[in-house]
Image (spheres, rainbow, N blue to C red):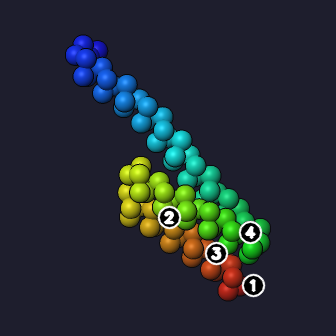
Amino acid sequence: MATHKSALKKTRQDEVRRVRNKAYKTRVKNVVKNVEAAVLEKNKDAAEKALHEAISVIDRIASKGVIHKNNAARKKSRLTKKVNALAVSA
């Protein structure tokens, strides 16, 4: 266990950040699930609306550094591909 004042503070900060980042990552997982559920239902309007929200959330999380920018780009690309495939098939 740390005994220096600065080390104790760093431990507290790390815990706060860990909990916050976990919440952010959970939020990303949920919005991705919403898009994929709308795609499975073949609901084009709901899928596009969910995609718009997902892209917004993913960009916000990437800008905070919780996920890497390339990870964010990959998630957005894959979701967009799924929604676009739904629009073509309809």
**Horizontal and vertical percent for residue 48?**
67, 72
Amino acid type, mark 1:
Ala
CB under 8 Å between discs 1 and 3 = no
Closer to the observer: label 4 or label 1?
Answer: 4
Please name the residue shown 45% across and 67% down the image.
Answer: 74
Label located before the other in sequence (4 or 1) = 4
- The residue indicated by pointer 1 is 90
Please name the residue shown 55% across and 53% down the image.
Answer: 28
Q: Nearer the viewer, residue 69 or 40?
A: 69
Q: Nearer the viewer, residue 37 or 66?
A: 66
The C terminus appears in which quarter of the rendering?
bottom right
Would residue 40 be visible to someone looking at this image? no
- The residue indicated by pointer 4 is 46
Amino acid type, mark 3:
Val
- The residue indicated by pointer 2 is 75
Amino acid type, mark 2:
Lys
CB under 8 Å between discs 4 and 1 = no
**Whole-number angstrom distance, CA of label 4 to CA of label 1:** 14 Å
**Horizontal and vertical percent for residue 37?**
71, 62
Crowd tier of the residue under label 2, counting other residues whose Cα lies within 10 Å: few below 14, some 14–19, many 20 or above: some
Closer to the observer: label 3 or label 4?
Answer: 4
Closer to the observer: label 2 or label 4?
Answer: 4
